[in-house]
Image (tube, helix red, strand yellow):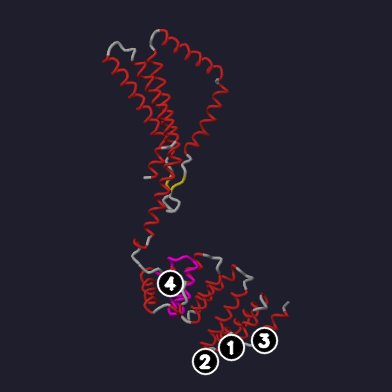
Amino acid sequence: MKNVLNFSRNKYLNYTCLITIVSTVIILLYSMSACNISGYVRLSGTLILLQFFSFFIGSFLGFLFGFPAHNNIEFKNKYVRNSSLKEITSWLTKIIVGITLIELKDIFKFFQVLVKKLSYFLVNDSSQVVIIACIIGIFFVLGFIVLYILSVTKIFEELVINDRNIEAILGDKSMNPNELNIDNTLHLDFSKISNSKKQDILNYISKNGVSNLNPILSKRLGKFLLYMKEYDRAAKAYKAAYLKDSEDKYSLLNYCFIKSKYLKDFDSSNDELKDLISKNKEFAPAYYNLACNYNREYLEFKETNEIEYIKKLRDKAEKNLQRAFELDKGLFSEALKDTELKNLDVKQIFVNSKKKE
């Protein structure tokens, strides 16, 4: 109701009402020149109807030119201001300036003819022609201007506010078929989450997947799923976080770690790390994780008869670890404690990395 009242107090509508009242009074006074009552009613009624007709035609055009353009792709920015009149105005301005410069003499002649015609109508008591022309011109322009201004200001504002209200209603818990407040739950210490809550989260993921949260919550969800030993879903959650924020390279490293260590999908994990290295050649953690992957795979298959393949895995692990040390010496202390690098001579690899400096 408040918005409706504010709309009715719009200054442009107030000016329009004032002009309409003044012009209506003038029409009523002019109509008193009729010979009788029936003539007075017919003349005043016709002129008032013409006044409203001109206003509504102008209003319709103003509304068409001013109504916000619609964006079908993005709901949050569904409406944008209509710029069609600006383009037409720019085009017409150039034409008018061009015609004025070329036809300047003819414009003065046309103005002289117009003045003479108006004088003739007034002298010969044909003032109704002037009245009708004024009514059509004034109210057509008035209607266009008022509705155009309202369309690009008040109507645009109302549409945007209504869309936001609809979005808020649809996002409200009462409209959400899932009553679990997963945002708050994922920010808790996992050890303090009750078993029923844990099951609720798993049910939520089974129904909605892992890709409908923001990047931070996707990472929290990945950590929670890893804690719950839901390794495949944990990997997908970390991958979803990376896809939403490609600057967060550590989410991709977590994805690769889970794929390699728990899911034994060495090939896809290695491919992701190689692709990351190709785009970020100075990113030491990617080389370190790739070394861990190769060593993990080496330990997995070292008892097989594929001696040459096993040797290549070990060589690749040493090569990538050395490259990681070359880029970041601080990784050495981490590597000494890392069980994923066991059976590798970490100290010697570190010494070799210093020789290349």
Per the model, the C-alpha gap separating discs 4 and 2 is 45 Å
| Mark 1 neighbour class, 10 Å CA radius: few under 14, some 14 to 19, many 20 or more | some
Please, what secondary structure does the residue beneath circle 3 have?
A: helix
The answer to which image quadrant residue 69 occupies is top left
**Residue 259, position as x, y percentages in the image:** 48, 78
> Residue most toward the top?
124
* Mark toward the start of the polypeptide (3 vs 1): 1
| Mark 3 neighbour class, 10 Å CA radius: few under 14, some 14 to 19, many 20 or more | few
Per the model, the C-alpha gap separating discs 2 and 1 is 16 Å
| Mark 2 neighbour class, 10 Å CA radius: few under 14, some 14 to 19, many 20 or more | few
Nearer to us in this view, 287 or 41: 41
Residue type, numbered disc 2: Glu
In the image, residue 129 sits, relative to residue 152, either above or below, namely above
The residue carrying mark 3 is: 347
Per the model, the C-alpha gap separating discs 3 and 1 is 12 Å
Disc marking residue 185: 4
Foreground: disc 4 or disc 3: 4
Residue type, numbered disc 1: Lys
In the image, residue 260 sits, relative to residue 117, either above or below, namely below
The residue carrying mark 1 is: 342
Say whether residue 88 is left or right of residue 178. right
Residue type, numbered disc 4: Thr
**Residue 301, position as x, y percentages in the image:** 51, 88
Segment tinted magenta in the rendering: 209-235
Foreground: disc 2 or disc 1: 1
